[in-house]
Amino acid sequence: MEAMTLQELNGRVKSTLQFEMPDAYWVQAEISGISPSGQGHCYLELVQKDSTGRTFLAKAKANVWRNTWLRIKPYFEQQTGEPLKVGMKVLLQVTVSFHEVYGYSLVVQDIDPTYTVGDMARRRREILMQLEKDGVIGLNRELDIPALPQRIAVISSATAAGYGDFCDQLSNNVYGFRFYVKLFPALMQGEDVERSVISAMDAVACRRDDFDVLIIIRGGGAVSELSCFDSYDLAFNIANFPLPVITGIGHERDDTVADTVAHTKVKTPTAAAEFLINKVFDTASELENITRRMSDAVNNRMNAEKLRIERLAQKLPSLFAVAKVRREQILENLWNRAVTGVSNVMTAQIHKLELIEKSVAAADPVIILKRGYTMTRLNGRVVKGVADLHKGDRLVTSFADGTVESEII
């Protein structure tokens, strides 16, 4: 059996591919790796996965040569608002290439950004649908922003110009309102944005009683760096956050998922500051109106009471005269009743004393003796019966006109 060298075999493969697939083809794939080179080229790793996203169905290397990369990279970012990155689904126009040493690869000729935009929109819709299914998409909007939101927790990059603009706007407001701002630093660009922002949110949540609202501001930077705010985990944390969340990420395009689940979304950090200032101003204006209405009501009531007192003062002399006559009449009636009552009591007591006097007089021993009765005593005690006497007792018997002595024999 005649053998061939590996180079000869690879040469036949190369010739076959060039003969069988000479044209350019549009291929759908997912980027699993991206490596720009120092020479201006870009090397991609492309994959296709099954419906579960866990199993690889195909893999291929793709090369984007310098001239092509300089053309398609800015166009793609302008159209999609994002750079090419791992995990992004793309529609590439490629030619098939095979090298005897480097093997099979694809050479990228063009890219269709509309496919990626559609996939990004689809992914955003899927995240929103999942949040809706989980019942959390509107939770943060159900919280009430305090009437005077002056204690502000801010998640931003410490060096971001937007954070500086936000603080300047609050500090130099024309009304002189005071705000307390506490920065919780986080990354606002790069692959670690999601993790960093969620970590900062956890730190704010631990001090939730110290703040009225949470502000997430980005400000400046490329629009292409906003995809991190289309994260399910970040959106879930915002939706469930215990304080009202205001986002000022600084862009004019469609809302991110984070904007959608936040309590309030504004365009820029400066707009976030203006929102807080206006909220405090509205409350201050309402308090001023209430104070004015209360003052007017008190003045009106005092004027009405003053007029009523003046009218009463005018009526006092006649009212006093009438009252005086009524009280004098009452006192006179009470006096007459008292005199009559005392007189009746005294008459009854005199009559009672007369009866007692007659009873006492009727019981006088002298009067009884004058009627012919006598009273006998033994040793000074009145003898009440014969049984009290004994032979030899000396008795004294009293008559109306004198006494006699006798002895029991």
Image (cartoon, rainbow, N blue to C red):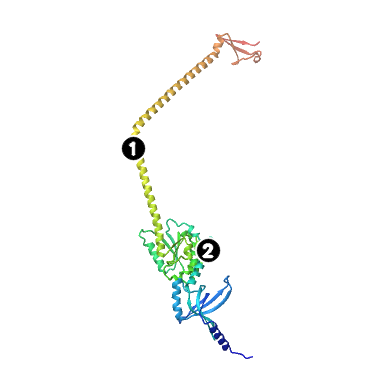
Q: What residue sits 38% from the left and 54% below the top?
A: 285
Up the image or down, 404 lies above or below 239; here it is above
The quarter of the picture where residue 332 lies is top left
Residue sitting nearer the eye, 42 or 288: 42
Q: Position of residue 136 (x, y in %)?
A: 52, 61
Say what amino acid the circle numbered 2 marks: Met
* Residue named by callout 1: 310
Q: Earlier in the sequence, mark 2 or mark 1?
A: 2
In the figure, 372 relative to 265: above or below? above
Label 2 element class: helix
Is residue 56 visible in the rendered image? The answer is yes
Say which of 235 and 120 sits in front: 120
Crowd class of label 1 (few under 14; some 14 to 19; many from 20; radius 10 Å): few
Q: Which residue is mark 2?
A: 129
Q: Which residue is found at the position 46% from the left and 78% from the top?
A: 69
Circle 1: residue type: Glu
Mark-to-mark CA distance, 2 and 1: 73 Å
Q: Residue at x 56, y 77 (%)?
A: 59
Q: Which image quarter holds the C terminus?
A: top right
Examine the rendered structure and indicate whether residue 41 appears above or below residue 325: below
Residue 181, position in %: x, y? Answer: 42, 62
Left or right position of 360 against 296: right
Residue 24 % position (x, y) = 50, 79
109 displayed left or right of 293: right
Query: Residue 43, percent across and down?
Result: 50, 79
What number is the disc on residue 176? none
* Mark whose residue sits in front, 2 or 1: 2
